[in-house]
Image (cartoon, rainbow, N blue to C red):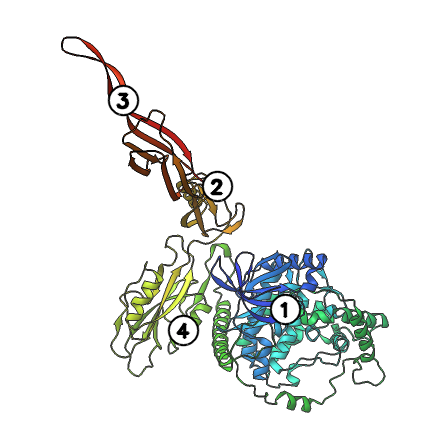
Amino acid sequence: MIKMGMMIGDRYEILESIGTGGMSDVYKAKCHKLNRFVAVKVLKQEFSESSEFVSKFRTEAQAAAGLMHPNIVNVYDVGEENGINYIVMELVEGITLKRYIEKKARLSVKEAVSIAIQISMGIDAAHNNNIIHRDIKPQNIIISKEGKVKVTDFGIAKAATSNTITSNVMGSVHYTSPEQARGGFSDEKSDIYSLGITMFEMLTGRVPFNGDTTVAIAIKHIQEEMPSPRNYVPEIPISVEQIVLKCTQKSPDRRYQKMPELIEDLKKSLISPDEDFVKLATAEKSAVTKAMSDKEREQIKRNAAVKTDVVTAASAGGIALQNTDKMGERKVAAAKNAARPAGTANKPAITGERPVRTRKEEELAARKKPVNRPKQEPVDVYEDDDEEDDSVLEKVKTILIILGAVIIGCVILYFAGLAAGIFGDGNSSQKKDMVNVPNIIGDTLEEAKTALDMVELKYDIEYAPSEGTAENTVISVTPTANTEVEEGSKVLLTVCMNGEGVEVPNVLNKSEAEATAILEKEGFVVEKLEENNDNIVKGNIISQTPEAGSLMSREGTVTIVISSGKLRTDVSMPGLIGMTEEQAKKVLSDMGLVCSSVSEEYSDTIEAGKVCYQSYTEGANIDEGTEVSLKLSLGPEPRYYDCNVIVAAPPRYTGGTATVILTAPDGSELWNTTVSAFPVQINLSKIYAVPKGTLSITYTVYVQEEVYDAAGNMTIQNVPAQDTYTQEIAFE
């Protein structure tokens, strides 16, 4: 059972629940290894008990983990711990496309096309990795707070091992392709169909087919003529209409065959929206719509019955599971009633009938204003059942409008280049990609940055006064607009600064905290970015924009790029136990790992001064640059002893004074006293780390010796002499 604060995989700390679905629960977590927030999807217990399902869950999640693209919600990790099966994903804060459409009623053509381009680019990246999504729908599209469109939940996809994959999943029925509805195969063209339905919804605010049951809707996808989006929104340009219709052809062979074909037409529609350039199959080539056989109809019912639960679970769990329980039987019965042909409202159109409502009624319905909803705080979106903050909506809207305008500009430049023969034939591998500097004079600095990012140009910023110009507005760009430059090169932006400027201090190579303090002291707003760097110490500043010495207005933004250390790669943790500190540090350094700290602890098995603990077990798969802590042995943990003994007189003692000394093995004195009589009582307590000692008694004895006088006469006399008696004493 998942609890807040618990650790999964020894690195992911569960912070809060952010969503739940039919097959999984979603949590916000912190990855302590990489110090970042992530989303963790945990498979529900009832599904974890099926070994076959868990195997499919992990296989498909691992396939999705191979996808890395700006328009995909990236999967970082997949694992199992104590019966908990989980997927770790990129945490995206924003709003689902479904919620965005609901809030706006419908999107503008430019906005819808701009979003569709980004979705297509993400799906194309998956297709290039032999992965078919199979559940493209607005609920699985997230628009981040920064306006980036990302496709999520590749969980029900499978890594394709051939040109097609057999479908055992019916995705959300409103967006499912005819071949999926029939229980047939799915390939790239199935995703294109679902994207076409999604575009239809963006443009009109509604889905083309609806019904009371999944079976009824599925039959419409198979049999009914696809309505034109212009039936509901007449101002939709013909090119966009034709793109949607080509995506949603009943026959996969008549759709776009590859995503790049669709992307090219989408970009062209932004330039020439009223041009009829989309190549559709002629009516003569069209297949005649036919009634389904009873066998086909029963197959659809069975698919819907066993897979309906999966439809809603896909966005939360990522994997489809066939459900053959009693609930499925009840759904079969419901499907039979829904599909009765005798005069029911759900009667499927056999020859491409139009919807029951008239066109005028549909247009009026589409133009109804959306219901006002109370504002709520934005949330981390991985499920589509939460309300979003309208302020976030407006921000996203603004960003998407800007991006749409930039895309239009870039596409115009591209096709102008084609017309001029700039991009002629030749060996492309020997040519560098060229782009045109966009016209951004008069744009705000943030708008200009977005425009330059879209064409992959870098920039430096300088500030200068300009009368009659709003502050932070671009007043010039070098090279000038429409100049052809290499992709990735740098342009210089001159931005309006009102009032007396402040010189930007140099914070290169300073720590993040120090750089921030210096800049904020001068009144600047600090924007922080991170990137890997092999030469700059982690946490120090790689670069700054504007450069040091530039003049800019107070409260202007200075962007600092902070080193996140070397680019991380996987390494196997070495075994360091028994090494000296110097040896262990060298091994870590050679492996690209960092010794973060060295402490000490007692060990009964490891020699003092040698490594007795390492923070990652030997053989663990960790990232290059990971910090490893060590502990050195102090030897066995010491004990405290007591000494309570009675010391008797030594054998040759005859009386007089005696010195009694008790010493430790290292020579230190534990007891020292002079006595004139025996026995002597020694009482010591809390003797640190000394299990025994040596008792020494020094005293005077008299011995008979021959003594000669001057004349040589000998006499026997008692002569005093020193004698020492030693004895080893064990302590308790």
- The kind of secondary structure element at disc 4 is helix
Q: Where is residue 145 in the image (x, y as percent from the top left)?
A: 49, 74
| Amino acid at circle 1 | Ala
Residue 687 lies left or right of residue 369; in this view the side is left
Is label 3 or label 1 in front?
3
| Distance of label 2 from label 4 (alpha carbons) | 65 Å
Picture quarter with the C terminus:
top left
Q: Which of 29 and 524 is in front in this view?
A: 29
Where does label 1 land, which residue?
316
Q: Where is residue 708 in the image (x, y as percent from the top left)?
A: 19, 11
Work out whether mark 3 precedes mark 1 in sequence or the reverse, and give the earlier one. Answer: 1
Q: Position of residue 627 (x, y in %)?
A: 44, 52
In this rendering, the answer to whether 717 lies above or below 83 is above
| CB-based contact (under 8 Å), mark 4 and mark 1 | no
Picture quarter with the N terminus:
bottom right
Is label 4 or label 3 in front?
3
In this rendering, the answer to whether 659 lies above or below 19 is above
Where does label 2 land, which residue?
604
| Distance of label 4 from label 3 (alpha carbons) | 108 Å
Work out whether mark 4 precedes mark 1 in sequence or the reverse, and give the earlier one. Answer: 1
- The kind of secondary structure element at disc 3 is strand
Where does label 4 land, which residue?
448
Residue 278 visible somewhere in the drawing: no
| Amino acid at circle 4 | Ala
- The kind of secondary structure element at disc 1 is helix
Work out whether mark 2 precedes mark 1 in sequence or the reverse, and give the earlier one. Answer: 1
Mark seen at residue 251: none
Mark 1, Cα crowd under 10 Å, few <14 / some 14-19 / many 20+, is many
| Amino acid at circle 2 | Asp
Work out whether mark 2 precedes mark 4 in sequence or the reverse, and give the earlier one. Answer: 4
